Image (cartoon, rainbow, N blue to C red):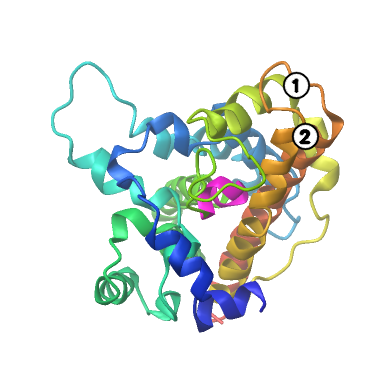
Amino acid sequence: MTRRRLLLGGVAAALIAATAATVVPDAAARPTAARRWGDAGHRMAAQAAAAALPADMPRFFRDAAPQLAYLNPEPDRWRERGSQVLDGAQDAAAAAEHFVDLELLPPRALEARDRYGYVERLAKADVEATKAGLLPYRILELTERLRIDFALWRKAPNARTRGWIEQRIVNDAGILGHYVADAANPHHTTIHYNGWTGDNPKGYATDRQMHSRFESAFVQARVKLADIQPLVARQPTRRVPLRESVLAYLEESNGLVEELYALDKREPFNARSTSPANKQFAAERLAAGATMLRDLWYTAWVASDQGGR
């Protein structure tokens, strides 16, 4: 059975049984550090995406590369826990937008038009949205918002208004980049988000530091922008139909979960790891995120002149 059939056509009985026997922590209780590439990885993904923009995209957007890189980690900054907060609603509300545990989804859940219909489908299957995650809808929503931004820019009545819209475009594109980069990490697509969960016959890591060991400590110490850029597809691709493209991207990442854990078993991901295979895997995933991000920016731009097609 293909990953797409698994996602849209139903979850295999064995997987359901394994998941039902597993206690999956509430998303709001998951450690903040366990849900991020880290600042370095997010910035590099955006830098690589911006460097691969085609010349036919607006000059203001191509010139915004440093700002796009700065904004990529922004949704994690919103969730930083300091000694005092005005209210805790922000972290709890935003946490589920950073991941989707595909193994938990009931059949056809991601065919729901919007996040509200998706949540209803999850509820009917007794799955909590805060545990399953909202990442696909966050990517879809922000990409569509960016298309609208570009369409408004095209027909702006004057230079002053166009300048305001440019600020909106760069901000939305930068924030979109965060979630696209998150999805490139297999950890953000699975119940095994921070150590293997449930039956573990192959003896994969179960420590609750595995996520940050991989995408923060290892990436910051061992992966450079120069490792990522050659792996980014040179020519942009229009990602249409958009939803199918986003789901395929998430499925591809999810399909690499076990490879990630097998690599970690051979040589644990951490700041001291020197494994070429580990470095190649991390660079390829960041490049996949950069490629997808560049393509979604480009898709929104092209579609803004075609009524969303």
Q: Quadrant of residue 81?
A: top left
**Left-right relation of 156 to 70:** left
Report the quarter where the N terminus lies.
bottom right
Magenta residue span: 181-189
Please provide percent x and percent y for residue 176: 49, 51
Q: Residue at x 38, y 59 (%)?
A: 132
Report the quarter where the C terminus lies.
bottom right
Query: In the structure shown, which secondary structural element does the residue marked by tag 2 occupy?
Result: helix
Please provide percent x and percent y for residue 257: 64, 51
Please provide percent x and percent y for residue 252: 67, 62
Q: Residue at x 25, y 43 (%)?
A: 92
Magenta stretch holds residue 103: no
Type of secondary structure dominating the magenta stretch? helix
Magenta stretch holds residue 183: yes
Mark 2 residue type = Asn
Q: CA distance from mark 2 to mark 1?
A: 8 Å
Numbered-mark total: 2
Q: Are marks 2 and 1 in contact (CB under 8 Å)?
A: yes
Residue situated in front as seen by the camera: 74 or 163: 74
Image vertical order of residue 307 relative to residue 156, above or below: below
Mark 1 is surrounded, within 10 Å at the Cα level, by few (under 14), some (14 to 19) or many (20 or more) other residues, namely some
Image vertical order of residue 172 relative to residue 281, above or below: below
| Residue for badge 1 | 273
Q: Residue at x 59, y 80 (%)?
A: 5
* Residue 174, label in figure: none
| Residue for badge 2 | 278
Mark 1 residue type = Ser
Residue situated in front as seen by the camera: 240 or 193: 193
Image vertical order of residue 19 relative to residue 302, above or below: above
